Image (cartoon, rainbow, N blue to C red):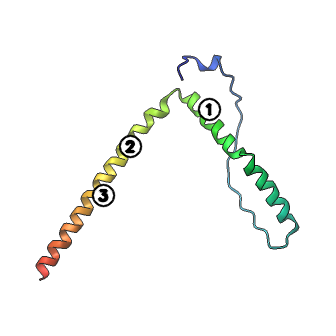
């Protein structure tokens, strides 16, 4: 992050990666079920998904040149404004309900 020209130090491999989700259903007793479970267990134990995700985050931080930290500020502002607005609405609802009960009696 402190190097002005990252491209000269690190040689990234530009490759096209596809991410997706797939659901596979097997009935009990299917001969492929045990083999599939073994393959999935090996995949999870090897932490291949975690390795791939870490590599994607690293590439993003190198290409973003520190812009990821700047993008977080508007997110927190939206979170803060949403929290304040929901608190105001909650207090208004409680007040209206109390006033309605007093007028009803």
Q: Which residue is mark 3?
A: 86
Label 3 CA crowd tier, 10 Å (few <14, some 14–19, many 20+): few
Residue that extends furthest to the front in the rendered view of this protein:
45
Q: Quadrant of residue 61?
A: top right
Q: CA distance from mark 2 to mark 1?
A: 24 Å
> Tag 3 or tag 1, which sits nearer the N-term?
1
Q: Which residue is mark 1?
A: 59
Compare residues 101 and 74 and report the one nearer the observer.
Answer: 101
Residue drawn at x 65%, y 36% is 55
Label 2 CA crowd tier, 10 Å (few <14, some 14–19, many 20+): few
Q: CA distance from mark 1 to mark 3?
A: 37 Å
Q: Which residue is mark 2?
A: 76
Compare residues 77 and 105 and report the one nearer the observer.
Answer: 105
Q: How many marks?
A: 3
Q: Quadrant of residue 59?
A: top right
Compare residues 91 and 78 and report the one nearer the observer.
Answer: 91
């Amino acid at each position: 992050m402190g190097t002005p020209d990252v491209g000269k130090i690190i040689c990234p491999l530009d490759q096209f990666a596809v991410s997706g989700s797939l659901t596979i259903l097997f009935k009990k007793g299917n001969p492929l079920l045990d083999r599939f479970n073994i393959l999935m267990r090996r995949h999870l134990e090897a932490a291949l998904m975690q390795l791939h995700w870490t590599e994607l985050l690293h590439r993003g931080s190198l290409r973003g040149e520190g812009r990821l930290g700047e993008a977080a500020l508007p997110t927190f502002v939206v979170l803060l404004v949403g929290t304040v607005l929901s608190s105001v609405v909650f207090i208004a609802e409680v007040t209206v309900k109390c006033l309605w009960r007093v007028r009803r009696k």
